[in-house]
Image (tube, helix red, strand yellow):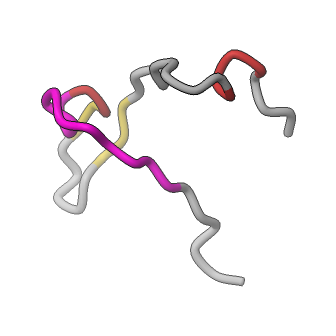
Amino acid sequence: MKIREDLMISGNKFPNFERPDQDGMIRTLEDLMRGWPTVLVFWRGAY
């Protein structure tokens, strides 16, 4: 999977997306951040 070059520039915004939370409710990245500085980390889960 190739990383988009425009995502690797410091200060650029990550695209908004939706995912279900632990209760199955759809949440957007924008809703979770609510204007706060955010570090977004992805991992595979199990290695």
> Is residue 14 positioned above or below 22 on the image?
above
Q: Is residue 3 left or right of residue 19?
A: right
Q: Quadrant of the C terminus?
A: bottom right
Report the front residue among 18 and 3.
3
Q: Is residue 30 left or right of residue 15?
A: left
Residue at the spot x=30%, y=46% of the render? 20
- Count the marks: 0
Q: Main secondary structure of the magenta part?
A: loop
> Is residue 27 positioned above or below 42 on the image?
above
Magenta range: 31-41
Residue at the spot x=20%, y=39% of the render? 32
Report the front residue among 38 and 19.
38
Residue at the spot x=55%, y=56% of the render? 42
Considering every residue shown, the one lying at the far bottom of the view is 47
Residue 8 place in picture, x, y as percent: 68, 28
Residue 7 place in picture, x, y as percent: 64, 24
Q: Quadrant of the N terminus?
A: top right
Residue at the spot x=25%, y=53% of the render? 21
> Is residue 34 positioned above or below 5 on the image?
below
Residue 31 place in picture, x, y as percent: 17, 30
Residue 5 place in picture, x, y as percent: 77, 20
Report the front residue among 19 and 4.
4
Q: Is residue 13 left or right of residue 47?
A: left
In reply to whether residue 32 is colored magenta, the answer given is yes
Considering every residue shown, the one lying at the far front of the view is 10
Q: Quadrant of residue 19?
A: top left
